[in-house]
Amino acid sequence: MFKYFSIVNIRIDTSLTILNGLDKVLPKSLEYLDLDLIFDLNNLRIFWKIVNTVRLDKLLIRNSNVKDNEITFDVLKEFVTKTMVKDFTYQVDSHYRNYRYGNLVNEIWS
């Protein structure tokens, strides 16, 4: 089984389709998950349901949707805390936030 999984997509309709199909391809344990998709609050519900069954060490979310990115970040932080993801990075366009072990360790706005 694979340890790393990465997907890049910038279309909202395809992003939803990809998220709906993740449960069919993700193993129960994954070292690194990198998703560059368009996330909105509806997509996050799907993401949460699917990825909640996978043990992740590192999670990189690159969101092409600039709307409600603070809310999206807060929801993802909650997910990371509950699932004990060790290393989490959230990026929206030109800024990113790195969240590790329950503490916000790095925030850069370009």
Image: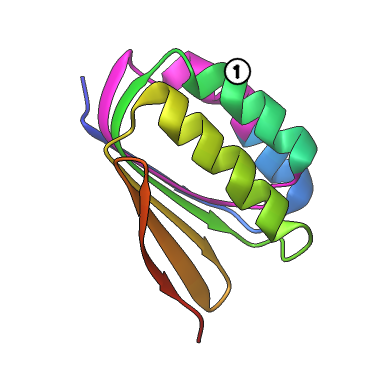
Tell which of 80 and 23 is nearer to you.
80
Amino acid bearing label 1: Lys
Magenta residue span: 19-40
Locate residue 106: give its quadrant.
bottom left
Q: Is residue 79 above or below residue 109?
A: above
Q: Residue at x 21, y 31 (%)?
A: 3
Locate residue 14: give its quadrant.
top right
Tell which of 62 and 77 is nearer to you.
77
Q: Residues within 10 Å of mark 1 (few under 14, many from 20)?
A: few
Residue 71 in percent (x, y) is at: 71, 50
Residue 4 in percent (x, y) is at: 26, 37
Q: Which residue is drawn at 58% across and 53% down?
A: 9
In the current view of this chain or complex, which residue is farthest to the front? 103
Q: In this view, does 107 lie above or below 16?
A: below
Q: Residue at x 58, y 73 (%)?
A: 93
Q: Is residue 39 magenta?
A: yes
Residue 101 in percent (x, y) is at: 29, 41
Q: Is residue 88 above or below residue 48?
A: below
Q: Is residue 11 magenta?
A: no
Q: Residue at x 50, y 87 (%)?
A: 110
Q: Name the residue under label 1.
A: 49
